[in-house]
Image: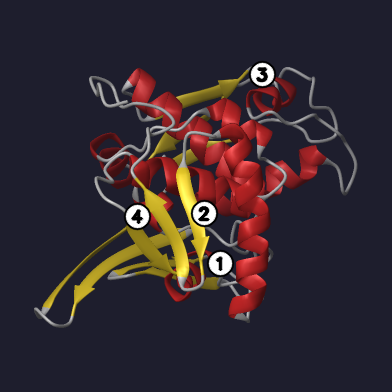
Amino acid sequence: MARILVQATLPHSRPKTHEFERVNGRFTLYMNAPPSVGLPFGSYPRLALAWLSTEAVRTRSWEIELGPTFSSFMYKLGLTPITGKRGTTSRLRDQLHRLFITTIRCSYADEKEGRAAGFGYTIAHKHQLWWSPRDPKQRPLWTSIVVLSAEFYDELVAHAVPIDLRALKALKGSPMALDLYSWLTYRMSYLRKPCLIPWEALHTQFGADYGRLRDLKRKLLSHLADVLHVYPAARLSEQPTGLLLRPSPTHLLRSGDSRR
């Protein structure tokens, strides 16, 4: 996964507007989509991003073929094709369109030092989805592809966070669980001493969809239990003021990283 989308993440549920903001310390992620389309949300765009990012890093190419049929692509994400208005095929097709048409802007600000920086991008420079949600097994005449934007591809390759797609497929029922898993394996990749993350900071990073801190805390701890089933080596504990992270093996090593 791209580091910027682990530090701050997509909406968990359908946003009420076409604008969205996440904050993680000095880092802010701002998203904007055409009102007629709307922002991506939930597990589906997260799974798609993880797969696309993995393919881009593996092949070192920003042009990615998605597969001969819609069904074959869905199986790569751990999803079962179900047709119909509320089926998985229509929902994934909709979320992919939202993801590829959304504009993302990132900013870093240190008011104390008077420093600020920012950049913007889209995930895809071009996308061609020739599949029919009504017949996901049908092989179209043309290949469905995504061409990542140069800005996103460069950021991804320079700052990729290793994740295990099998873990994401196991956690696909909860967007928060997906976010927590990616965040934990990223934090553990460089953590060298115990670190307390305040509940307030976790609320701004993960809980924009939860108005009250206690609601976020309850949901986060519930999904964290699921994450620890697939990532049992992560060492952490609940504290009255936050989550205490202790140095642990990251779930998937970077190439050339010998840390255990």
How many angstroms separate mark 4 from mark 3 (CA)? 30 Å
How many angstroms separate mark 3 from mark 2 (CA)? 24 Å
Whether residues under marks 4 and 2 lie with C-beta atoms below 8 angstroms apart, the answer is: no
Query: Circle 1 — which element?
Result: loop
Mark found first going from the N terminus, 1 or 3: 1
Q: Residues within 10 Å of mark 4 (few under 14, many from 20)?
A: some
Q: Kindly identify the amino acid type of the residue bearing the numbered disc 2.
A: Ile
Q: Residue at x 28, y 67 (%)?
A: 107
Q: Which residue is mark 3?
A: 141
Residue 212 vertical placement versus 255 (above, below): below
Q: Kindly identify the amino acid type of the residue bearing the numbered disc 3.
A: Leu
Q: Residues within 10 Å of mark 2 (few under 14, many from 20)?
A: many
Q: Which residue is mark 1?
A: 34
From the image, which quarter does the C terminus lie in?
top left
Mark found first going from the N terminus, 3 or 2: 2
Mark identifier at residue 101: 2
Query: Circle 4 — which element?
Result: strand
Label 1 vs label 3, nearer the camera: 1
Mark found first going from the N terminus, 4 or 2: 2
From the image, which quarter does the N terminus lie in?
top left
Query: Circle 3 — which element?
Result: loop
Q: Which residue is mark 4?
A: 121
Here the colouring is secondary structure
How many angstroms separate mark 4 from mark 1 (CA)? 15 Å
